[in-house]
Image (tube, rainbow, N blue to C red):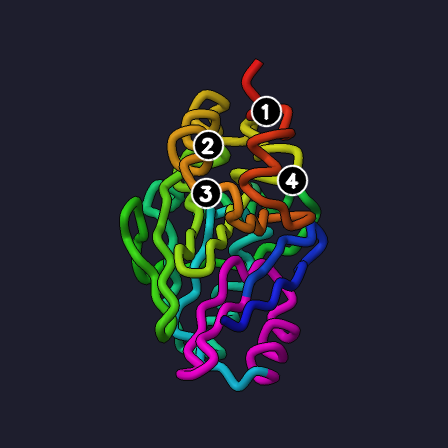
Amino acid sequence: MIHEILPVGPLQCNCSVIGDESTREAMVIDPGDDIEDVLALIRKHNLQVKQIVITHAHIDHVGGAMKLRGATGAPILLNQNDYSLLKMLDLQAAWIGMESPGKVEIDQSVGQADTVRAGSLTANVLHTPGHTEGSVCLYFPAEKKLIAGDTLFAGSIGRTDLPGGSFQKIINSLHEKVLALPDDTIVIPGHGEVTTIGDERESNPFLVKG
Ligand SMILES: [Zn+2]
């Protein structure tokens, strides 16, 4: 598995470029910004992007998706429960003082139990509402890797005070879906350091049982 993690944009969203070493087919997850740098990685590994997957419709994760689709022809996938947030991209841009990326078109919704593929690589989609209603995580069972979006961070969890957020829902998603994964699962959060399910189960203050 080729896996490059590139922090993009002013909020340093972790964009993942994941490719199959033999077929060179790839998926890009959360191309929030800095698409020239993402494309440079794609060229460096000689990859062909087949899917653009968005963990949730916050601007720092989805802002560069149309530019990447234009450059690669790959479809954009996002859970349908976040389509309403896409209509607020101008407002989201204003919140963080960014230029609006314009309209983002979704090619396909992805939800619980769907799979996303690039060559021989397969990710299971976990629908994990809470940070937003349409938040998803991608779990690669063969590689024991989780792309967590803004649902889980090293030592923290996603904020739930923005439109569509729910603290009770994110806690339920974490306990029912994320913590159901094996302890040695590597977690790539939407921002910040890589961690593991075991470390978070043991020490994340939002998850440890009192
Ligand atoms: Zn977010």
Point out residue 5 in the picture as x, y percentages from the top left corner. Answer: 62, 63
- SS state under label 1: loop
Question: How far apart in space, not on screen, are marks 2 and 1 (Cα)?
Answer: 10 Å
Q: Reply above or below: 129 against 145.
A: above
For the residues bearing labels 1 and 4, Cβ distance under 8 angstroms: no
**Mark 4 residue CB less than 8 A from any atom of ligand 1:** no
Question: How far apart in space, not on screen, are marks 2 and 4 (Cα)?
Answer: 13 Å
Determine crowd level at label 3: few under 14, some 14-19, many 20+ residues with C-alpha closer than 10 A.
some
Q: Reply above or below: 208 against 29.
A: above
Answer with mark 1 or mark 4, whichever residue precedes in sequence.
4
> What's under tag 1, amino acid-wise?
Phe
> What's under tag 2, amino acid-wise?
Leu
Say which residue appears at 46% left-offset and 32% top-offset: 174
Does residue 32 appear to the left or right of 74 in the view shown? right
Residue marked by disc 2: 174
Residue 182 bears which disc, if any?
A: 3
Answer with mark 3 or mark 4, whichever residue precedes in sequence.
4
Question: How far apart in space, not on screen, are marks 1 and 4 (Cα)?
Answer: 11 Å
For the residues bearing labels 2 and 4, Cβ distance under 8 angstroms: no
Residue marked by disc 4: 154
Q: Reply above or below: 178 against 43.
A: above
What residue range appears in magenta?
17-44
Point out residue 43 in the picture as x, y percentages from the top left corner. Answer: 57, 84
Between marks 2 and 3 in the image, the one whose residue lies nearer the viewer: 3
> What's under tag 4, amino acid-wise?
Ala
Point out residue 159 in the picture as x, y percentages from the top left corner. Answer: 58, 31
- SS state under label 2: helix
Answer with mark 2 or mark 3, whichever residue precedes in sequence.
2
Is 38 part of what is drawn in magenta?
yes
Residue marked by disc 1: 206
Between marks 3 and 1 in the image, the one whose residue lies nearer the viewer: 3
- SS state under label 3: loop
